[in-house]
Image: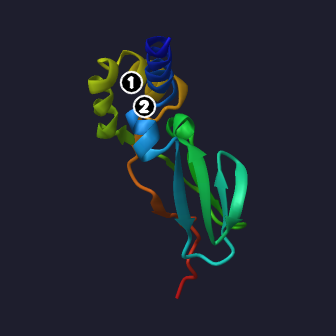
Amino acid sequence: MSRFFNVLLVGSLIFNISCASMFSGTSEKIRVRSDVPGTKLYLNDEEIGTDEATVKIAKKKLKDSQIIARKEGCKSKKVDIETKFDPTTLLGLFLDFGIVTIGLIDWASTGAVFEAERTNYVLNPVCNSPKS
C-alpha cells in the first residue's frame, strides 16, 4: 500500500508543479511611468494609472499585451511587451523529460515558459512643443 501512495505522491507533484512556474512564477509585475504630467497609462485599452503604474500580468498573456500612453492633445505612444524564453523551464527535463512539466504546464497551461524581456517602461505621448 505504501508503494501506491509513493507513486501517487510523485505523480501528483510532477503534474502540479513545473520548474518555471515554481521558481519564476506565472505572472510578471510590469512598471510603467511617463515623464509627461497628466499622461493616462493603459494596458490593452484598460486604464491602469496616471503618470505611473504597476500592473501584474499573467505570463500567458504577455505576448498579447500592449502598453499605451495617452494625453489629450498629444499623439498616443504604444509599445508591445516583448518576451523571451525562461531558461528555468529546462529544469523540467530532469523531472519527466519535459513532457508534462514543460509541454503541458509551463507552455500550454501557465505560459511560464516565457518571461518579459523588460519589466520597466518609460512611455511618453508625443506632444507638440511650443515654437520659439
From this view, report whether residue 13 is shown above or below residue 70: above
Residue indicated by mark 1: 102
Q: Position of residue 92 (x, y in %)?
A: 33, 28
At label 1, which amino acid type do we have? Ile
Look at the image and tell me whether residue 82 can be seen. no
Which residue occupies the extreme bottom position in the image? 132
Neighbor class of circle 2 (other Cα within 10 Å; few <14, some 14-19, many 20+) is many
Which residue sits at x=38%, y=49%?
A: 117
Q: Amino acid at mark 2?
A: Ser
Determine which residue is flagged by label 2: 18
Q: Nearer the viewer, residue 2 or 108?
A: 2
Give left or right: position of 98 versus 8: left
Residues marked 1 and 2 touching at CB (< 8 Å): yes
Residue 24 is left or right of residue 51, and the answer is: left
Label 1, label 2: how far apart the Cα atoms are: 7 Å
- Number of the front mark, 1 or 2: 2
Q: Quadrant of residue 124?
A: bottom right
Q: How many marks?
A: 2
Q: Label 1 neighbourhood size at 10 Å, few (<14), some (14-19), many (20+)?
A: many
| In the image: residue 109, left or right of residue 119 | right
Q: Element at badge 1?
A: helix
| Colouring style | rainbow
Can residue 1 be seen by looking at this rendering?
Answer: yes
Where residue 106 sits in the image (x, y, percent)? 45, 29
117 sits to left or right of 11: left
Residue at 46%, 18% in the rendered image: 11
Q: Position of residue 59 (x, y in %)?
A: 51, 40
Residue 59 has which mark?
Answer: none
Q: Name the foreground residue: 105 vs 35.
A: 105
Decide: is 47 above or below 7. Answer: below
Residue at 54% from the left image edge and 83% from the top image edge? 131
Q: Nearer the viewer, residue 31 or 58?
A: 58
